[in-house]
Image (cartoon, helix red, strand yellow):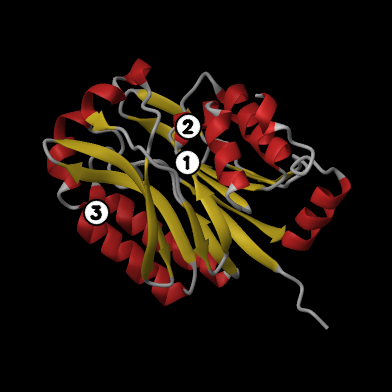
Amino acid sequence: MTTKREIKAAAIQFTIQLGDIDANVAHVREAVARVAAAGCRLAVLPEMWSTGFAYKELNELARRTPETVEEMGRLSEEHGLVLVGSLPEPDGDRVCNTAYVLDRGRLVGKYRKIHLFSLMNEDRSFSGGDSWLVADTSAGRIGVFICYDLRFPELARRLAVEGAEILIVPGEWPKPREEHWRALLKARAIENQLFVVAANCCGVVGKLDFFGSSLIIGPKGEFLAEGGYDAAELIAALDFEEMTKWRQQITCFPDRKPQFY
């Protein structure tokens, strides 16, 4: 008799304190403890969760990222889960927007944001990444992309083709584009027949107002958990057997014809 393959996942949504690493780490420390107590084996944090886009101090703040990654590792080991979130990674005289994947204390991968949001001048302050990530973890095979990457379905499809079972999306997606966030996340889940765990920030951060609406979505596009405007920890069960059954019913991957497009 086989054991049912299912995990609980969490999206941790909160208002990032711009440039205040200690306050943001303190919030995450408590939130991770809460979702772990609820049985979660995967927890996702927003984009740039330790600092926000504090552009003027970004290079200086990025120097503390190694200690923040160590804290993520400590939390993931203490609570026996996979913890993912993006941070400013030092890169010479610039920084990268890098998502770190910590699995029970061990760094199993990191992904540098490929698509930089020029509307908000990200391309002036950040170096872009040049490779994708699918990581084998104790919570399953996870593919990672960050915020604006969501608008590029080619990246999500690459992760799915490479065996991702869960797409992880740390975000700082502001008003007024909430419907785009929801529609694009749902589309990525449906077209790739996998789970999506997306953590957005909420509240006013600097001059921007964020709507929250973090989402956990199933492979049929069903919303398994949905956040509102305020800080919250969303939790949902991810049933991999149901994902497999759905892929067997609607055979999108075997029916692909990539040689024609």
Upstream in the sequence, badge 3 or badge 2? Answer: 3
- Quadrant occupied by the C terminus: top right
Residue 175 position within the rendered picture, expressed as x and y whole percent measured from the top left = 49, 22
Task: Name the residue furthest bottom.
Answer: 1
Disc 2 element:
helix
Q: Which residue is mark 1?
A: 145
Residue 48 position within the rendered picture, expressed as x and y whole percent measured from the top left = 34, 41
Report whether residue 62 is seen.
yes
Q: Nearer the viewer, residue 12 or 228?
A: 12
Disc 3 element:
helix
**Which marked residue is nearer to the observer: mark 1 or mark 3?**
1
Q: Which residue is mark 3?
A: 22
Q: Could you give the CA–CA distance between mark 3 and mark 2, rounded to whole angstroms? A: 28 Å
Q: Are marks 1 and 2 in contact (CB under 8 Å)?
A: yes
Give the residue drawn at x 68%, y 34%. 186
**Which marked residue is nearer to the observer: mark 3 or mark 2?**
2
Give the residue drawn at x 57%, y 49%. 162
Residue 209 position within the rendered picture, expressed as x and y whole percent measured from the top left = 43, 26
Residue type at numbered disc 2: Asp
- Quadrant occupied by the N terminus: bottom right
Q: Could you give the CA–CA distance between mark 1 and mark 3, rounded to whole angstroms? A: 25 Å
Q: Could you give the CA–CA distance between mark 1 and mark 2, rounded to whole angstroms? A: 6 Å
Crowding around mark 1 (Cα neighbors within 10 Å: few <14, some 14 to 19, many 20+) is many
Residue type at numbered disc 1: Phe
Disc 1 element:
loop
Residue 99 vertical position relative to residue 122 in the rendered view, above or below: below
Q: Which residue is mark 2?
A: 149
Report whether residue 201 is seen.
no
Residue 115 vertical position relative to residue 144 in the rendered view, above or below: above
Residue type at numbered disc 3: Asp
Task: Name the residue furthest top.
Answer: 119
Task: Name the residue furthest front.
Answer: 259
